[in-house]
Amino acid sequence: MTALQHLPALRRVAVCGGTHGNEMSGVYLAKHWLANPSEIQRGTFHTTPFLGNPRAVEQCVRYIGRDLNRAFTMDILNYKDSDTDSYECQRAQEINQTFGPKGSSQAYDFMLDLHNTTANMGSCLIVASEHDLLPLHVCSYIQKQSKRKHCPILLYQQQGQETYSINSVSKAGLAIEMGPQPQGVARADLLAEMRSTVAYVLDFIELFNKGTLFPAFEIEAYKVVGSVDFPRNPSGEISAVVHPKLQDKDFQPLKPGDPIFQTLDGENILYEGNDPTYPVFINEAAYYEKKAAFCKTEKQTLSQPALQKF
């Protein structure tokens, strides 16, 4: 394992809710902190709360023209012809100017992005890749502090893929994905849990800035490797639903031959993959438009070196 790693102190942190306007835990918390910011302040750094997609929040929809959380690629951030841009493209550029620019030394040190999912994902912690040292140390700290046992780590960036999420404009970042929760609905238990998880992240940064040594560790993570669409008829319409034996089994092993879909005639459709996978975002409402009944992941064990401030 690599020797002790050092990083500079973090001075500017952003907390975003409402990247998707109908994911209500983050929406409610961001609005609360905009009016009452003291809760998310700490002694060694400043925290800025904000609403990612205010228009979508007003209408209680995921987005207006396109998914904001897929709009932070360099092509979109550098695109000049604003007359033909969607609202989300313009908003991505605004966020990049405020909290970035992406990849620059001027960018915010850390961004926390708050999401809900209709899938049974628990308190899922989403990091771009296994190379993100600081966010993975944050995840390890959350897992030790959280009262909820199920805090899995999901790595979303696939090989050769550019980061595209809202927190990619900052130097480091983490998304919290809590569920199951219906779109447009706030559940008090998940809202309280998200609030606690945000506090753990801010507490970690405070400890880090004060010189705490965080030891090396090994940790499990699930890396996205692809997705599986619903069965469809010749006209492209969905012809089967997620099988009862797969529903709500996020992060549990799916083996070749296990049922994944069921037609309205009662026929079972089986998983034909060559190897076991760990499905996530199973039957996520927002992913119907993305033609994904679930995402496939590989379970990995990551070794991370010790970390301390310069």
Image (cartoon, helix red, strand yellow):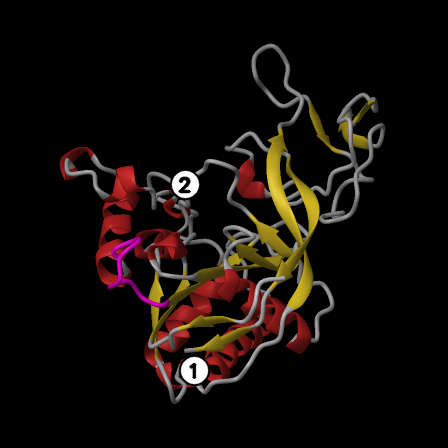
Q: Which residues are magenta?
A: 101-109
Q: Position of residue 120 (x, y in %)?
A: 68, 52
Under tag 2, what secondary structure? loop
Pick whichever, 170 or 251, lies toward us: 170
In the picture of the structure, the residue carrying the numbered disc 1 is 209
Q: Residue furthest bottom?
A: 43
Q: Residues within 10 Å of mark 1 (few under 14, many from 20)?
A: many
Q: Residue at x 78, y 36 (%)?
A: 276
Q: Position of residue 238 (x, y in %)?
A: 63, 23
- Relative side of 295 to 87, left or right: right
Q: Position of residue 298 (x, y in %)?
A: 69, 42
Q: Residue furthest front?
A: 3
Q: Quadrant of the N terminus?
A: bottom right
Q: How many marks?
A: 2
Mark sitting earlier along the chain (1/2): 2
- From the image, give the main secondary structure of the stretch colored magenta: loop
Q: Position of residue 182 (x, y in %)?
A: 59, 53
Quarter residue 29 falls in: bottom left
Task: Name the residue type under label 2.
Answer: Glu
Pick whichever, 194 or 100, lies toward us: 100
Q: Residue at x 32, y 57 (%)?
A: 54
Quarter residue 224 falls in: top right
Q: Residue at x 47, y 64 (%)?
A: 26
In the picture of the structure, the residue carrying the numbered disc 2 is 162
